[in-house]
Image (spheres, rainbow, N blue to C red):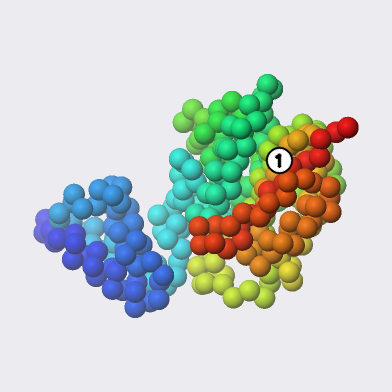
Amino acid sequence: MSRVPVRGVVSEGVRMLREAGVGSPEVDAETLAAHVLGVERGRLALVAMVTAEQVGEFRELVARRAARVPLQHLTGTAAMGEIDLAVGPGVFVPRPETELLFAWALAQLEAAGHEHRPVVVDLCTGSGALALAIAHARPDVEVHAVELDPVALGWARRNADRCAADGDTPITLHSGDVTAPRILSELDGRVDVVVANPPYVPVSAELDPEVRDHDPHLALFGGADGLDVIRPMVATIARLLRADGVAAVEHDDSNGSQVAELFRRAGFLGVAEHPDLAGKPRFVAARRVRAE
């Protein structure tokens, strides 16, 4: 079977993706090549030659990526923390920025040193990314996750089943609306940490084709100002948290101060705005008032 150098094939993919306006052509071409070859991207340089069949598969994937199909839909996975999640059509693809929210949650759990078994709730879980990453990192924690969209919930169940089969502490998935007055009422006053990556994009926002054409709109848009879900969700968070419990909510980079004010008006203390690695406002954290 004839073989060709992998370096030249990847270079061809980079050129195609660059011409198509893909933002990270080198990373994407290398990731797709590694996917075809069944190796980690960091070990791609150790592969010298590829078969004609592999070249054909790679070119097909590059062509789809050039048509702005999300990279994660082509590989079938997205990372969060130390786990890989199955993703595809019908579920929001986790973003690297949300790793900051995940790291914040772990830091809160570590700092608190709970004498009881900590309880974490992930609102608008989507693929289950935050909930499952937390359960993987902290097997001692009781994790609940809520999702409204039945298609996304199906992806979350698939990921949860796989993580449990791999030995992680199982999480509890709930089908429901995070803005409903009695959602998770059985957990009222028991939750130590709430995290949420809700729909928060203003409907007028201009989005890349990968987002606009492939992420489910139910997971993206939060009304005219991006706060239609976050506003009522703050009341849900306040009800769920125990005294001194903490919460963090990811938001559009235009809404940091508005989200912080929503928490202040609800009586939270220690409200803090957190930027992402690019310096843009990314999530707001707050602490529930201690009971008198």
Which residue lies most toward the top here? 115
Badge 1: how crowded within 10 Å, few (<14), some, or many (20+)? many
Q: Is residue 131 left or right of residue 174?
A: left
Q: Nearer the viewer, residue 280 or 155?
A: 280
Measured from the top left, where is residue 238 in percent x and y?
Answer: 80, 43
* Residue at 29% from the left image edge and 62% from the top image edge: 58
In the picture, residue 207 is in which quadrant? bottom right
Residue drawn at x 74%, y 42% as measured from the top left: 287
Foreground residue, 249 or 55?
Answer: 249
The residue at 24%/64% (across/down) is 10
Q: Quadrant of the C terminus?
A: top right
Q: Quadrant of residue 62?
A: bottom left
Q: Residue furthest front?
A: 270
Q: How many marks?
A: 1
Image position, residue 190 (x, y; %): 77, 31
| Residue where numbered disc 1 is placed | 246
